[in-house]
Amino acid sequence: MVIWMKAIQITFDEEMLEQLDARPEVRERGRSAVLREVTAAYLAEKRAEDIAREYREGYTKYPQTDEDLAWAGVQAWPAKADDDSVDFLSRRVFLDTNIVQTLQSQWFREYFFDGYWSPEAEKQIEHRGSRFSEDIHALAAWMDLTRRGGWPIAVSRQTFEELRAHPDMGRRSRLLRWVSELNEYSAWSAAHYAGPAYADSAFAFLPDPGDAVLIREAIELGCATFLTMDYKTIHRFRDRILEAGIEVLRPVEFMERLKPWIGLLR
């Protein structure tokens, strides 16, 4: 694939230019490559800010009322779809931030999207253990099904906030572009799903307050499944989270639930 680039002229003061040229990545890759990456990160940041602002404006325009929060505790959602029910196939899936990051991992991205299993991926699997290995292969199998027929998924404002905090600028830029694409992809199904409103305090038992926000937003987005590889917190508290009507599943557990219907999906 040929990518055409346009040459432009920009100006720097001498001190800034000297600092730029002193950076190892500039010496290795050149000014243009680094400046393109910085620009991409800036644009991704601004896109994330736009989406976060749209979320805020939506909550401001249609704020949660006391009545919404009061009803949240009594609304009846099916706690768990029957394994034999085809309704499971239409359940919207919320992608935890660690799932979003894993899908763009430098070691597994080619496996998820192209089916290529690299030696580096094998080394990572050996290092991280069997549970991680099971979830990586299950996630790849689900991505294969998703490419064939699509799937109602969701990410949220908190997803953007967590990815914006990533310390590595280049990876942060790629992740923000990726989650923006996921957000736009998921918008087509948004009108068909809606869930009850909860206060973050309803999930105060979670050690990380950010996880409480993710669970609340996932429910409000009408998700009945919360897909995660967070083994230490969210998955550990899944029984308590299930009481709110959303089922926390690892990728391998999710694919196990799909087994009766895989033939239909392929």
Image (cartoon, grey):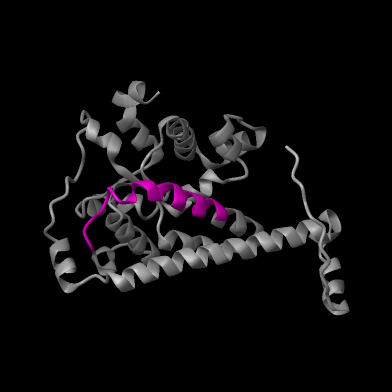
Question: Which residue is depicted at the point 76% across and 59% down?
Answer: 34
User: Which residue lies most toward the top here?
Assistant: 263
User: Is 187 a magenta residue?
Assistant: yes
- From the image, which quarter does the N terminus lie in? top right
Question: Can residue 161 be seen in this snapshot?
Answer: no
Q: Vertical placement of 134 versus 207: above or below? A: above
The spot of residue 238 in percent (x, y) is 28, 50
Q: Vertical placement of 114 versus 41: above or below? A: above
Quadrant for residue 241, please give it: bottom left
Question: Which residue is depicted at the point 85% across and 72% down?
Answer: 17
The spot of residue 36 in percent (x, y) is 73, 59
Residue range highlighted in magenta? 177-197
Question: Which residue is depicted at the point 18% across and 68% down?
Answer: 69
The spot of residue 89 in percent (x, y) is 29, 34
The spot of residue 71 in percent (x, y) is 13, 63
Foreground pick, 121 / 40: 40
Q: Vertical placement of 262 versus 37: above or below? A: above
Please tell me whether the stretch drawn in magenta is mainly helix, strand or loop.
helix
Q: Is residue 95 left or right of residue 206?
A: right
Q: Is residue 94 left or right of residue 31?
A: left
Question: Which residue is depicted at the point 87% across and 73% down?
Answer: 18
Foreground pick, 159 / 230: 159
Question: Can residue 68 be seen in this snapshot?
Answer: yes
User: Is 54 a magenta residue?
Assistant: no
- From the image, which quarter does the C terminus lie in? top left
Count the marks: 0
